[in-house]
Image (tube, helix red, strand yellow):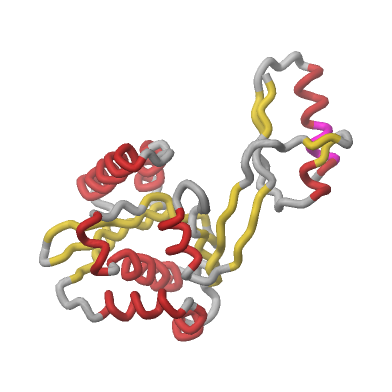
Amino acid sequence: SRSILKQVKKDLFSKNSIFFSMAPELNFSFDNILVDDKFFFTKPSWFSSKIELKPDLDTIFKNLKKEWKKDLKKSLNQQDLQILNTNNEGDIEKAVKHYLNQSKEKKYKSINPNLIYFLNNESNLLTLICKYKNNYVGSLSIGKHYPGATCLINPIFENSRSLKLNHLLLWNAIMELKKDNFTFLDTGGFDFEKTPGPTNFKLGLNGKNYKLIGEKIYY
């Protein structure tokens, strides 16, 4: 992998490229971040975790951290909570608008909403809508790239968080992905400093954490 990166760098400079960015999906290691004996990848690394979906549901449940299990049980006992699987364009647009508004309010970096629409049109998106007493309260959209899947957007109304509906959404997503024989679910990245709440939520799933080498921009 290091030799490939060196060759790419050489080829691009030979063509007088004025701008290029590299962010390969390589695990963080001393060898991978060095090219030409210099620290090459200096942008922030990508942190995330993967949930193995091959085990049965009982095993996955037992592997959850104690508090996560407790909150999931609470959500499962909420009779007025309802989870709907949808690819309806109106539902997707509503979820995206909710996500963009929430990202703006909390000053989170948002993903391009066109990705969500594209994946839905290509039947590569799993979107679950949560309703409480028949009112929309949140959603979860997951990009499918068999045999894996990745959490993309997960907007939740703040006044509904006490219902632990986020736990119910994720658990239902796990069940849906297992039905289609997906082998892992990527939690979609986390940031300990900027988004400690969502990060702690994802860590509660007790998946396998990993770190990628980051990005390098030349111009």
**What is the quadrant of the N terminus in the image?**
top right
Range drawn in magenta: 3-7
Q: Residue at x 36, y 80 (%)?
A: 70
Q: Is residue 215 left or right of residue 203?
A: right
Image quadrant in which you'd find residue 54: bottom right
Image quadrant in which you'd find residue 118: top left
Q: Nearer the viewer, residue 28 or 86?
A: 28
- The rendered magenta stretch, by its main secondary structure, is classed as helix
Q: Residue at x 54, y 80 (%)?
A: 55
Q: Residue at x 49, y 54 (%)?
A: 188
**What is the quadrant of the C terminus in the image?**
top right
Can see residue 66?
Answer: yes
Can see residue 189?
Answer: no
Q: Position of residue 84 (x, y in %)?
A: 24, 64
Q: Position of residue 110 (x, y in %)?
A: 40, 39
Q: Is residue 142 magenta?
A: no
Q: Position of residue 184 (x, y in %)?
A: 54, 66
